[in-house]
Amino acid sequence: MAAEPRTVTLLFTNDVESAYDPIPAFWLDDYENIGGIAELSTLVNRIRETEPNAFLFDSGDIFTGALAKLTEGRLAFELMATMGYDAMAIGNHEFEYGHEVFAWQKNRASFPVLGANLFYRGTDHPYAQAHTVIERNGVRIAVIGIMGTDAVSAIIPSFIAPLDVRDPAPLVQESVDELRDDVDLVVLLTHQGKTAPMQTDAESDPRLQRDIDADIALAGAVQGVDVLFAGHADAGTPEPVVHPQTGTIIMQTYGQATHLGYLQLELDGVTGSIETFSGRLVPVDSDGLQPDPRIMAKLVNYRNKFPELLDVVGRSEAWMFRRYIEESDVGNLFADAFAEMTGSDIGMIHSGSLRKDLPGGEIRLVDLLDTYPFVDDVIVKRLNGAQLRTVFEQSFTLERGLMQISGLQTAYDLSLPDGSRLVALTRNGVPVADTDTFSVAVPGFVAEGGDLYTVFADLPEISRGDTVTALMQAYFAQREVIAVPARGRQLEIRP
């Protein structure tokens, strides 16, 4: 008698980035609130109750935010262990506190933390485990994890300098060849492609949609991968994408724990091949899911360890929004503070570093840390007009969002080719000449050439000041109320 087919359910997340609380779903019609790690855990558990062959994976970027920063990532691993993750790939945010901190903290994981293409520089000594095999109810799954080169450019360069991130394709193929004959499925977890736009409603803004071309290319370059769960681009796939040559099934969520990826497979009882499949992204309906009490208890415990998170550091006159490819309230605020507190001519901050809006009224330390969660100093360098033009031409590609500025005014035309979109660059209404020089205050990430702003990397430091968080606290302390900065610094010219 022929063996019965087997049903396997693969659940996945990517780019959770310590987004632990529900948020208003202002861009959706069917939900009041969405997301929350405790609500996500309840959703996972509900599926496990009815589908016993359920596996749970993550494609990287589990760190960022106030609690991740204060615990150097410990909390993220504690929550994932409680939720019963089976494996994860390493993402760029895992290096926010340096490669040594992450190497230590990943020892807390009760599951494999995978990075097949990460090696100590100049050696063949691996930084992380390449692959693993997971077995449940007789179903055996090989899992491989990789991080792409674009993700590397989203890390403070000195934080990952001792590591090499190699071409993933031959290393993935090596793992597949080692494992393929011993398992029912091969799952590849990737963290690559274009950097995601950090904007809460990016899912609904077509200008911000990223592609999954890097994952499609990798799926075509490697033989024997059944399923590829991707991260980094937050390029949600409402339905699975199937590679036309290899048949690899590709999916990704929008990130920040707002959706749970779901892929159900029917395996032939004799050959083990995939007979049918169905996949979707399941919204985490915060109002329709009771928070998992185990997760809530851990969140409360860790928050109680840091009561200073609730300290009021300032007050704002109104809500301040961040935008990725536009001038924004939060971007202008930080750039103004950088310039004023360092005594610089110009302040700049890259849009991708601004992770949350700032509320109106009381601003607590947790709000500030969640808005800018990274560990770097404010550094002042000197740039001439020609170098500033290079900075803005990179900005106006919008590849890494719009550089937010203080002390300058720009006009740009996105209909023009990359590299020639800057139409006007002025300071107080006066055109900036190529030979003019200015002191420019930026976060350390930009100062080291991060987010493709390589012009900064080789310039000497004029000064190194406080951390971004300390500088912003001091800026708020000097004011009873923070006004929303006036817009109009960057004018998009539309033909």
Image: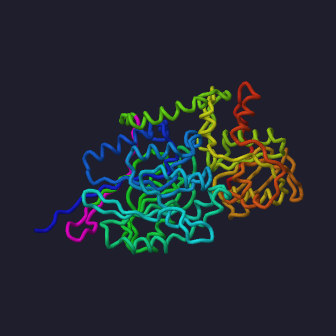
Please give the name of the residue rendered at 45% of the width and 51% of the height, measured from the top-left corner. Answer: 109
- Quadrant of the image for the C terminus? bottom right
Q: Which residues are magenta?
A: 266-286
Q: Nearer the viewer, residue 66 or 29?
A: 66
Give the residue at the far top of this rendering.
480
How many numbered circles are shown? 0
* Towards the viewer: 190 or 220: 190
The answer to whether any part of residue 490 appears in the image is no
Residue 62 higher or lower than 33, as above or below? below
Q: Position of residue 264 (x, y in %)?
A: 30, 56
Q: Hey, which quadrant is residue 428 in on the image?
A: top right
Give the x, y percent position of residue 27.
49, 41
Q: Quadrant of residue 148?
A: bottom right
In this rendering, would 225 be left or right of 456? left
Which x, y percent locates residue 117?
Answer: 52, 67
**Residue 438, above or below 473:** below
Check residue 272 for magenta coloring: yes
Q: Is residue 473 in view?
A: yes
In the image: residue 375, left or right of residue 265: right
Q: Quadrant of the N terminus?
A: bottom left
Residue at the image point whose x is 56% and y is 60% from the top: 194
Residue furthest to the right: 435
Foreground residue, 344 or 131? 131
> Where in the figure is residue 182, as x and y percent of width and height?
31, 70
Please determine whether, in this image, residue 477 is positioned above or below residue 131. above
Side of 458 relative to 261 (left or right): right
Residue 442 within the magenta-colored segment of the rendering: no
